[in-house]
Amino acid sequence: MGASNDTAGPRKPKTDPGGTPGPAYSVDPADVARFSALAETWWDPKGPFAPLHRFNPVRLGFIRREALARFGRDGTGRRPFEGLRLLDIGCGGGLLSEPMARLGFEVTAVDASEQNIGTARMHAEAQGLTIDFRHGTAEGLMAAGEPPFDLILNMEVVEHVADPAAYLRDTAAMIAPGGMMIVATLNKTLKSLALGKVAAEYILRWVPPGTHDWSQFIRPDTLKAWLEAAPGVAPRGPFGVTYDPLSGRFSESDDVGINYMMIADRD
């Protein structure tokens, strides 16, 4: 692991909310409470999670393309990922879990907020989707002996955990041989402070004030070093994502100044 650490220091560990024995609960309880209070609004495209609804198409396109290439699947079929296990960490209301299930993945989705899981489960059932939603943490799943996953989605979570280096090492250990993990987060730059924090929370009001802590944002080289330290894992990226205010759309980009993704492959 690299010597640099983009966290503001360790937070007090908590018990896993799902009651599963194992590593200390990694997520900040204040973050859990903040997202829990908004649980009923996850599927409102004009509500507090409107930015995620706008962000989702580029995330889904990236995940689908990279997974097709990694697993050698035919993208012309309606459910190209049949037979593959997927873990959606910090699933929220299920904005990624549902489309992944429609693509054929056997989806397990975990979130530290019981309210989020309740919302996600009810919405998925209304859509006729079978998704294994669980209240708890990824570390809890690992400690309980959960089998490895072919694809792990670690999207916009790592900047909220107490010890991101240990968290990434633990989640990478859950990747099945030949599988992959996709990590999405925010870069620690002046640009991300101005746009990803100040503008998004206090000017545009995209997310509630206090949603992000800029001191917890992570530089790509730091994230890459942490993934390289995970046994048997080879990182790729970063892959940038930018927002066009004229079109109101996010798109893939070479610019990693604010949002970016990275892939961890296991042989």
Image (cartoon, grey):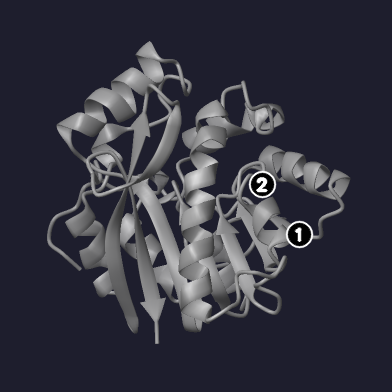
Image marks 1 and 2: residues in contact by CB distance under 8 Å: yes
Residue at image point 70% right, 56% down: 134
Q: Position of residue 229 (x, y in %)?
A: 25, 74
For mark 1, what is the residue? 131
* In the image, farthest residue toward the left: 3
Residue 215's image quarter? top left
Mark 2 Cα shell of 10 Å, populated few (<14), some (14-19), many (≥20): many
Q: Position of residue 38 (x, y in %)?
A: 63, 27
Q: Position of residue 147 (x, y in %)?
A: 62, 80
Image quadrant occupied by the C terminus: bottom left
Residue at image point 82% right, 43% down: 122
Residue 210's image quarter? top left
Instruction: Please state if 112 lies on the left or on the right of 77 as rendered.
Output: left
Q: Which of these two is toward me, 159 or 248?
A: 248
For mark 2, what is the residue? 94
116 relative to 72, above or below: above
Q: Position of residue 59 (x, y in %)?
A: 49, 50
Residue at image point 47% right, 77% down: 70
Using the numbered discs, state the Cα–Cα distance from disc 1 to disc 2 in whole angstroms: 9 Å
Q: Which of these two is toward me, 200 or 212?
A: 200
Residue 41's image quarter? top right
> Which structural element holds mark 2?
loop
65 relative to 61, above or below: below
Q: Amino acid at mark 2?
A: Gly
Mark 1 Cα shell of 10 Å, populated few (<14), some (14-19), many (≥20): many
Q: Earlier in the sequence, mark 1 or mark 2?
A: 2
